[in-house]
Amino acid sequence: MRKTGRTGEARAASAKSGNVVFAHNVMKSGNVLRAAIALAAVALALAGCDLAPQGSKGSTASLFAVDSKNGNVYEIDETAAAAAGAPLLSVAQNAAGEIVFSEDIGFVAVGSYNNTAPGLYRFDVSAAAPQAVRVGNRISAQYACVVSGALGYVTSADYGGGYANAVYSFNPASAAAGLGAAVAGAPAGFFPQDIAVAGGRVFVADNGNNKVLRLSADGASFDAAYPATARGTTGLLAGGYDYDKDGDDDVGVFVANTGGYDANWNALPGSIDFIPADASDGAAATPVLAGVGVGRLAAFGDKTLVATNYGATYIVSLSGVPAATEVKCAGLSFGSFDAAVRGGYAYVPDGANGLYRFSAAGTDARKIAVGKSGEYVTNVGVRP
């Protein structure tokens, strides 16, 4: 389950100053001394790729990673399998996590742990110098999804009780519009996590009750709840699956259940479930794969999923009898609470200074260095 403060990753120290650090380029003049040129060349090599040089009209990257400790957002160069040496922007808050996009507009969810202004932050990556602005009031933001250019949703969950456990709407096109009213009808013990859209309906993982809730067609309230097959209901992924075995894939959401813990904090078995978008209220989730505890899902295609949790990442085949195969890099396991697929590769952050990349076959696995020493790279997002 994602913890309140860092949207699920290992807790980080308090945010540092609010100064924003932008990606840079080494500019040379015709009169620069040779020694200075040499030093500049070394600095540029150490800085990594430069996708948003000074004077540009914005980032050309499609893949971005978030440092949870300081709220730094880094560009990832997919061609070079490298990260920019300096962040494109920063939300300047600890507990930064989930990153999603609506075209060029990005959003970072910031939880309530050890910071001064948690909430949903908005920025424009097409700007020469992107600036992050909080959307509406402070909330302990966890996950977000974009339904359309004018509608999105963000979940808020806080163990400490300082902020409401709720789901709010927002307008991706306007930070000034703030957040809408909380979705009505949340059950007792509601602790919302991931949120996804499938079949024109919005679904929310309720970690507190081990269920998935569905919003009403107008988005004002909840109109259905579906019990998961294991505890720790956390991640959601829109997709298709032949849950009724009639030969046709049905539109719905895959559900990642970590398994949770027993009274002595021993990990319990998790699972991957599926819920069709038109399921009736109270219908139980269909088990897809039992015994695999995962917190986040992504997809290579209709028949291949990426499933990850702290310490392990799997490729899940949905062809025939579903099966999971662990992916390793140089013989070592890795995992986190986030994953994204882009250009034929999956990307999974390691919670430190790395982002793992691998193919749908689980091969060509390598680690991309991201961020500075002491930072916590926890999330990854794709700009359409």
Image: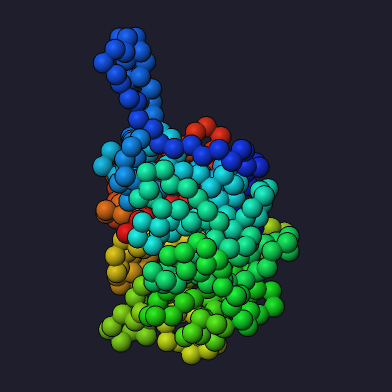
Q: In which image quadrant can residue 262 be found?
A: bottom right
Image quadrant in which the N terminus is located: bottom right
| In the image, residue 101 above or below residue 181 | above
Q: Residue at x 32, y 64 (%)?
A: 304
Q: Is residue 145 left or right of residue 128?
A: right
Q: In which image quadrant can residue 119 be found?
A: bottom right
Residue 250 can be seen in this image: yes
Q: Residue at x 64, y 60 (%)?
A: 138
Residue 354 can be seen in this image: no
126 or 224: which is nearer to us?
Answer: 126
Q: Residue at x 43, y 47 (%)?
A: 130
| In the image, residue 311 above or below residue 293 | above
Residue lying farthest bottom?
280
364 or 66: which is nearer to us?
Answer: 66
| In the image, residue 92 above or below residue 289 | above
Q: Position of residue 223 (x, y in %)?
A: 54, 87
Q: How is the image coloured?
A: rainbow
Q: Residue at x 55, y 82 (%)?
A: 220
| In the image, residue 134 above or below residue 92 | below
Q: Position of residue 178 (x, y in %)?
A: 55, 66
Image quadrant in which the C terminus is located: bottom left
Q: Position of residue 164 (x, y in %)?
A: 68, 68
Q: How many marks?
A: 0
Q: Position of residue 242 (x, y in %)?
A: 34, 80
